Image (cartoon, rainbow, N blue to C red):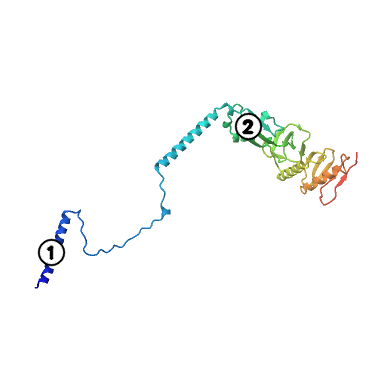
Amino acid sequence: MNDDTKSVENLTNENIDESAENTAGNAENPDVKTEKISESVPEKQSYNFVNVSDEKEEIPEKSVKGEGKNNFVLLCLLFAILTSLLFTPAFNIKIVAVTGNNALTAQQIVKNSGIVTGRNILRTNTRSAVKNLKKIPLINDVHVKLKFPSTVEIAVEECVKTAYVKHLDKYICIDKSGKILEILNGAENENLIVVTGVVPTKFEVGSKITFKDGEKFDILTSLLSEISSATDLPNAVKSIDLSDKNKIMMTMDNEIVVNMGKNDALQYKMAYLTKTLETQLKTYRGGTLDLSDPSASARYKGSAQ
């Protein structure tokens, strides 16, 4: 072996010994870094993608607690204000204004409503007042409104007494819809229509009247509705006889008896009646006017007075 070969072997052995010593030294002292002889190969890198929109923004716990505390303080403040208003004399009811009444007095309406002056307006139950007032047969509709600080407004719509249904010795007062308003022993109001030729089977104040012949109820309410709408009718209707449904008879205040025929074309017949009474029969009294056939001319039998 020549000198060059020997030197290489010695160098290699020395390097191995040195590497062993370094390894042993690192084992004894872990803080000492070792150098890699070979070229390091970079490891494969990986990437994590995060969807920002999926991340929920965390609300600080202190902020939530602070908001809850503010709400509680606000509720306490509102409660204190409401309590003070309930005991403030300025909100006690001083005026109860009633409008739309005719047959009923304002005192009757206020008393039945349950509204009391001097009571705090915030304690007033308007729904209860409306319910109480609708129990009165003469009231068709009612509205109750609070007007701060101390006024209550009651607007009523009364039923209009339209006719008496004669039954035995009783006079059942109804409006144009057939609602019973009162039951009397006699006809107190001479301006109301007296209805005959029907047999009532149920008559209770506040309810609709019923007849043995149900069709006659429909005929009567239709006729009363048309009469109520005919505001320009020159003569008032005194009575209606429904004994024969095909021959409805009306008597006017000038004693002219009108044969209306069947319950058809009532609007046309009423318009024709109005025109006839205003012109041809303006000075007539008594007699009979036949309007039973709307397609024919009216026929009058009688004489002028």
Whichever of labels 1 and 2 marks the residue nearer the N terminus, that label is 1
Out of 123 and 88, give the one closest to the viewer. 88
Q: CA distance from mark 1 to mark 2?
A: 115 Å
Residue 178 placement: quadrant: top right
* Element marked by disc 2: strand
In percent of width and height, residue 171 lies at 74, 34
In percent of width and height, residue 300 lies at 87, 45
- The residue tagged 1 is 14
* Element marked by disc 1: helix
Q: Residue at x 15, y 56 (%)?
A: 25
Q: Quadrant of the N terminus?
A: bottom left
Q: Residues within 10 Å of mark 2 (few under 14, many from 20)?
A: many
Residue 114 placement: quadrant: top right
- The residue tagged 2 is 152
Taking 150 as reference, is 265 above or below it? below
Outermost residue to the left: 1
Q: Quadrant of the C terminus?
A: top right
In percent of width and height, residue 89 lies at 57, 26
